[in-house]
Each structure stands twice: as structure tokens, then as C-alpha cells.
Amino acid sequence: MTVHYRRIFKSHQTGVATIRELLQTMFVGEMLLVGKKIWIVSPWVSNVVLIDNRSGNFDTLNPEWSRREIRLVDVLVALMARGCHVVIVTRNLETNTPFINVLSDVAERNALESQVTIKIHDALHTKGILLSKCLLMGSMNLTYNGLEMNDEWIQFSIDSEDIAKTRLEFSMYTVGV
């Protein structure tokens, strides 16, 4: 029997490293085999650390990053530069504004505005990260507290049917855009 998903129950004491490693692996994988479109759906979102490159292990992914912690905006812009369209669905909250502004500014500076869609949905409670070959869904917002502090339930899936159904559901957020 092939297992296509994994459930993770995280508290501020357990599972934090698991979530960090999972997100790092997901986004490194996406950098290696860039898809056409990815989705980040989170009512609260911030420029969290995704990849720990302080040791230089990921220098070949993007030599411009240097040896430091690589944040969400860095990864998204690198994916956009490789042809991936990034869709962010979030709420109109003051805490999301810095992330949205930084992503928009960096995309504009790199002439990548056409590669990003930011959709504000004030009734949003859904949370998920949908990459080309995997899906992470659950209770976790993409924030420091979501990754490090809060108790969260997360499910990681590589099931192609699950990914396809979620892609259809997420596309409803951008109907008419």
C-alpha cells in the first residue's frame, strides 16, 4: 500500500522542526522542478523563513541568495523568475500588509508583476499551500506563530487526485480576475 499523505499534529513543543523541514523540502523541490502555478491560501501571511541556507547547502538553487535564511518572498520571486505564476489569497488585514507590499515591490523591481496574483478575500478561513506536486493543508496560517508557536493540525499530500481537486477549489478564488 502506498501512502500519499501524512498528518502532523504540532504544538510549540513538538513538531516545529518537522514543519520547518517539510516546508523547506516542499519549496526546494518546487525550485528544482518549477510548475506553472502555485497557490498560497492563508488568512494571515508573513515573510516567514522557508529555507535555511546558512550552511550553503542550497547555494546552487539561487547563488544570489548567499548564506542566510531564505524567506517566503525570496523563494516566490525566484519561482516567478523561472516562469511560475504565484497566487496569494489572503485577508485584508493590517498584519498582512507588509508581506503583500514587499512581494509586490520586489516583483515590480524584477519586472515580474504579471507572474503574481494577490487576491483579497475577507471571509477567508481556508489555509493551504498548493505546489505543483504537493499540498499542505490544515489549521496553520503562514506566519511565525503558525509555524513556531500555535498548536496546529496539518496534512501533507502528494496524491494527484487530491492536488487536482484542490487546484480546482482554489481557482474559484480568482474567478473574474
Image (spheres, helix red, strand yellow):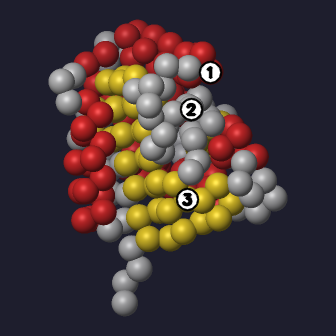
Q: Which residue is mark 2?
A: 44
User: At which x and y percent is residue 123?
Assistant: 44, 31
Under mark 1, the amino acid is: Thr
Mark found first going from the N terminus, 1 or 2: 2
Under mark 2, the amino acid is: Trp
Distance in Å between CA atoms under marks 1 and 2: 7 Å
Under mark 3, the amino acid is: Ile
Element at label 1 = helix
Q: Which residue is mark 1?
A: 95
User: At which x and y percent is residue 152?
Assistant: 64, 55
| Marks 1 and 2 close (CB-CB < 8 Å) | yes
Element at label 3 = strand
Mark found first going from the N terminus, 3 or 1: 1
Q: Which residue is mark 3?
A: 154
Q: Which of the image's four quarters has the N terminus? A: bottom left
Mark found first going from the N terminus, 3 or 2: 2
- 1 up-or-down from 143: above or below: below
- 46 up-or-down from 22: above or below: above
Q: Is residue 168 visible?
A: yes
